[in-house]
Image: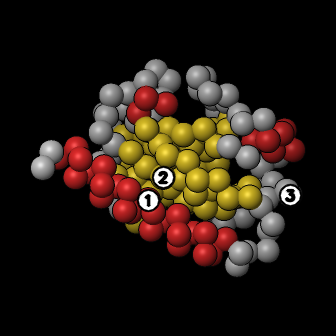
Amino acid sequence: MNTNILLNRRFAVVASFVLITLAACSGMGSSGGAMTGTMLAGDQEVPPVVTSAHGMSMITVAADGSVSGSVKTMGVAGTMAHIHMAPMGKNGPVIVPLTQAADGVWSVPSGARLTPEQLKSYQAGELYVNVHSAANKGGEIRAQLKP
């Protein structure tokens, strides 16, 4: 069987597991935020990156601006990951650096909170998450966060 098909099936199984697990846990928090699940891909980077790497972000932003969640990646040795402020098609500054929790897993640090301006940008769809690598220092995979 084609390696890409196997990778895609494996990713679909892992992504489904992550979504089900996080959905089950989403009611456990008291923040009242909406969880947004998005797929990270190289073609979303600016400029686009040709890569087989991919990922899934599960980020929650509460009405008070508090942020929680994580990003799971596959096929990339990430060197760092962040939430940035910029609309789709543009690059912007880091606003929340993520911490590596495990191999291929990046987490929002406890106590992370958006400023009122950043929260408005999130509500307008102008925040994104990306994972950087040694080969793609500006970012290898990216996804726009949707409120």
Q: Which residue is mark 2?
A: 56
Q: Earlier in the sequence, mark 1 or mark 2?
A: 1
Task: Please name the residue shown 64% across and 33% down the image.
Answer: 93
Q: Residue at x 74, y 58 (%)?
A: 34
Dot 2 crowding, Cα within 10 Å, few <14, some 14–19, many 20+ = many
| Mark 2 residue type | Met
The local secondary structure at tag 3 comes to: loop
Marks 2 and 3: CB-CB under 8 Å? no
Q: Is residue 80 left or right of residue 8?
A: right
- The nearer-to-camera label among 2 and 3 is 2
Q: Which of pointers 3 and 1 indicates the residue nearer the eye?
A: 1
- How many marks the image carries: the answer is 3
Report whether residue 76 is seen.
yes
10 Å crowding of disc 1: few (<14), some (14-19), many (20+): some
Q: Position of residue 24 (x, y in %)?
A: 60, 75
The location of residue 76, given as percent across then percent down, is: 32, 46
Q: Is residue 8 left or right of residue 111?
A: left
Q: Position of residue 134 (x, y in %)?
A: 33, 38
Check disc 3 and report the residue beneath it: 64
Name the element at disc 2. strand
Viewer-nearest residue: 116 or 4: 4
Residue labelled with disc 1: 15
Look at label 1 and name its amino acid.
Ala
